[in-house]
Amino acid sequence: MRLLKLKDVIFLTGLGRSTVYKYIAEGNFPKPVSLGERNVAWVESEINDWIFLKIKMRDEAKL
């Protein structure tokens, strides 16, 4: 299991920082794991699952 910092999540998803946190607040994005008082990271597999879901939704919309 690998943990990703925010900069890596932004790179993989193409989202901005504020959008990541907006989606989390809306329940539409994986929640980060607390690593300390001011340190969080995301589980890589959860981010990949979110990306694959977006691809699946795109492909299903074409049907």
Image: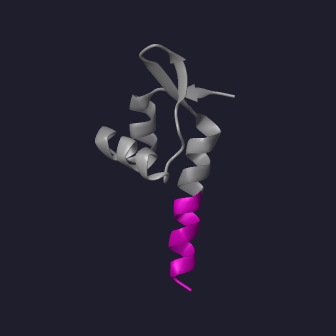
> Residue at image x 54%, y 43%?
30
- The answer to if 37 sits in the magenta stretch is no
Q: Residue furthest right?
A: 1
Residue 13 percent coordinates (x, y)? 43, 46
Q: Residue at x 48, y 23 (%)?
A: 40
Q: Is 21 placed above or below 23 here?
A: above
Residues drawn in magenta: 53-63
- Quarter of the image with the C terminus is bottom right
Residue at 39% in and 30% down: 7
Label total for image: 0
What is the residue that sits farthest to the top in this orientation? 37
Q: Main secondary structure of the magenta part?
A: helix
Task: List the single residue furthest toward the bottom.
Answer: 63
Q: Is residue 10 left or right of residue 1?
A: left
Q: Is residue 19 left or right of residue 6?
A: left
- The colouring scheme, among rainbow, by chain, secondary structure or one colour, is one colour
Q: Does residue 50 lie above or below 43 as drawn?
A: below
Q: Position of residue 16 (x, y in %)?
A: 31, 43
Quadrant showing the N terminus: top right
Q: Position of residue 60 (x, y in %)?
A: 57, 77
Residue at position x 45%, y 45% from top? 24
Considering depth in this image, is 22 or 53 the residue closer to the camera? 22
Residue 52 occupies which quadrant of the picture? Answer: bottom right
Question: On the image, which quarter does residue 20 sit in?
Answer: top left
Q: Position of residue 11 (x, y in %)?
A: 40, 39
Q: Is residue 55 magenta?
A: yes
